[in-house]
Amino acid sequence: MRHTISILVENKPGVLARIAGLFSARGYNISSLAVGETQDPEISRMTLVVEAKDERILEQIIKQLRKLIDTITVADFTKKDFVGRELALVKIDYKRENQRKISSFLDKYSVKLLKRKEDKAIIEICANPDKVKEFLKDVRAFGVVELMRTGRVAML
Amino acid sequence: MTGAQILIECLRREGVEVIFGYPGGAVLPIFDQLYEAPIRFILARHEQAAAHAADGYARATGKTGVCIATSGPGATNLTTGIATAYMDSVAIVAITGQVKTNLIGNDAFQEADVVGITRPITKYNFLVKDARDLARVIREAFHIASTGRPGPVLIDFPSDVQTQETQFIWPERIEIRGYKPTYFGHPGQIKKALHLITQSEKPVIYAGGGVISSGASEEVKELAERLQIPVTMTLMGLGSFPGEHTLSLGMLGMHGTVYANHAVTGSDLMIAIGARFDDRVTGRLDSFAPDAKIIHIDIDPASISKNVKVDVPIVGDVKNVLEQLLEEIELKHNQLPNTKAWLKTIRDWKRKYPLFYKKDDAGLRPQYIIEQIYELTKAEAIITTEVGQNQMWAAQWYKYKDAHTFISSGGLGTMGFGFPAAIGAKVACPDKEVFDIAGDGSIQMNIQELATAVEQKIYVKIAILNNSYLGMVRQWQELFYKKRYSYTHITSPDFVKLAQAYGAVGIRVSKKDEVRPAIERAIKTDNVVMIDFRIEPEENVFPMVPAGEAINRMIGGMA
């Protein structure tokens, strides 16, 4: 099962390596990761989406994260009512004959068209994780040339 | 003051009396300060040995050990010693030189990413880029190393920072917001634990290295005696409870006693204290203490329910938690369990399955040698070990009376650990007899330290159980690989002549009646003594639980 874990860490060099190293050394999987400064520039927020086979592994992941000297708080948001956002950029085929279909598709998901060049377009979705997932499934119909996504950020 | 001067001043204020290490280009400013510092410096002959010696010093005293090496290869040589201390939760502070800050990342001469290399084998590490941070970093390093679950901390110290001038400010207080170990047990959990204790009929205490690092031997003894609960110990826990005590079951696990493993398997309550359910202890997990409720006391929450699901976890310093528990027990003194029948069962197991070896006059048995060292040192010595058969025999046949007297690489299992660790222990406890129980394989992994010991007059005694084999691997090949002894037969130098070449004393023993005189002579001799015991080549360590088996399914070693 996927879990959304939110960590406050010291904003200093090497912290990301410690977190990443913990996951690789113990064989845990990170599905996505987002890191950035908080309102306090000395503290960063990391939001991790991790794959844990069972509760025991999840418990270990959280305990091991807490054990790191540079982590200040560790919280599992999974069962909480959090606001989650992910962002994806998708480059799609934008042929003239498809335009109408694409427009209505973009409207359905309230997706922004950021750039058009020749017969390609870059579109952006920023939404909750379920919606992004659904969108990414549907957008395939238009021919995905390139896809990139950020990690999830989550707030209670 | 310069960075190097600040370092020495901070070490002095941290109470450091001795440093083990080796000089080099990137630590020249520090060594220039050490030249006249009020700190003893022990020059090793290999950085790995310096780290093990600092570790041995720490294990013998409970203080923090300090080692120092230069950048690049000096630092990478320390890593085995750091990893050894990490696996066994030993407080050491390792200081490494680093290339100048403007050269970091340039593949400079003797540059290595030491902070990167040691990240997974240290409790924490620092790269100091500005001498103004140094005093705080050193204070934090010692604090992190020695508190909570102890462990090694490394400070990487570029040479230009060593010469950088700055004002010295000693931080009176340190505050690390992400590091706040829990020292006292939750009262609710203590009550739950007590409830399980009052319900039990067949309890067993399983004591690990945490009892020793917490200084809780007295409390464990009080708990065991008050409730009449038998105590088994892990390899790391040996010495935490007196080996000769009637309630002692000795060691459990792969080479534990039959009665300890039977007691664990048959118990209805296990009180795990400062132990971590290592695979060498538990064997097959689903058959480990199958009928027992488990109370687990440990300062490291991540150790709890990692391998074995625990019924009552209590996070806290073992000593504090046991004190809390003992107070609660006093309040319920009329509801304590009656373990008489259980203790009788255990007495029967002890009678039926004692530790055993063949007592003939044919060959020299290693178990006999350990027994004689035990008797002749009156259980007062510090015993260090290498890794393999020598280690297991030393664990089985010497009955450790006190904490800090058995020093062995348990978690990492580092061959070459015992001799330098003995040097560190002897430096810490010059009035104690210190014996390294070695094998002919292991001793050669750090034998160059004979020079250190002789030069610095650190008179440790080395008992080599010489069977011309890498014995433990040979034993596994005998039992599980159809006696195909692939690269486990070894020839060694003449250890007597080798000892003499270093200025130490060498003694060879081939017969049983020479054993006691040789040990007596070693104890009396004011020098480093190396005894080459020519033991039965194919003697095995028994009893034994085959890897992955249930711990009550032991083979061998029964009369």
Image (tube, coloured by chain):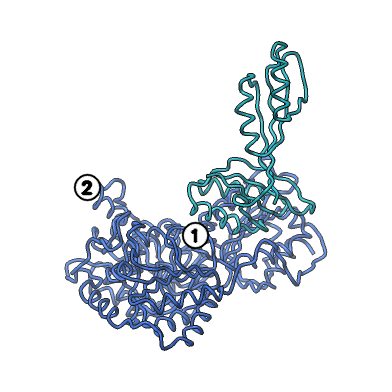
Chain colours: A cyan, B blue
Sequence-first disc among 1 and 2: 1
Q: Amino acid at mark 2?
A: Lys
Q: Is residue B445 above or below residue B92?
A: above
Q: Position of residue B498 (x, y in %)?
A: 39, 61
Q: Is residue A112 above or below residue B314?
A: above
Q: Measuring 56% from the left and 57% from the top, which residue is drawn there?
A: A63
Q: Is residue B493 above or below residue A127?
A: below
Q: Which residue is at the far right?
A: B167
Q: Is residue B15 above or below residue B287?
A: below
Disc 2 target residue = B482
Q: Which is more toward the observer, B501 or A33? A: A33
Q: Which quarter of the figure is the N terminus of chain B placed in?
A: bottom right
The nearer-to-camera label among 1 and 2 is 1
Q: Which is more toward the observer, B209 or B142? A: B209
Q: Measuring 76% from the left and 69% from the top, which residue is drawn there?
A: B171
Q: CA distance from mark 1 to mark 2?
A: 32 Å
Kind of element beneath mark 1? helix
| Host chain of mark 2 | B
Q: Which is more toward the observer, B528 or B295? A: B295
Q: For the image shown, how many numbered marks are present on the structure?
A: 2
Q: Residues within 10 Å of mark 2 (few under 14, many from 20)?
A: few
Disc 1 target residue = B87
- Horizontal side of B485 relative to A66 (left or right) equals left
Q: Amino acid at mark 1?
A: Met
- Horizontal side of B14 relative to B234 (left or right) equals right
Q: Position of residue B370 (x, y in %)?
A: 31, 72
Q: Which quarter of the figure is the C terminus of chain B placed in?
A: bottom left
Q: Which is more toward the observer, B383 or B143? A: B143
- Horizontal side of B8 relative to B46 (left or right) equals right
Q: Position of residue B377 (x, y in %)?
A: 37, 80
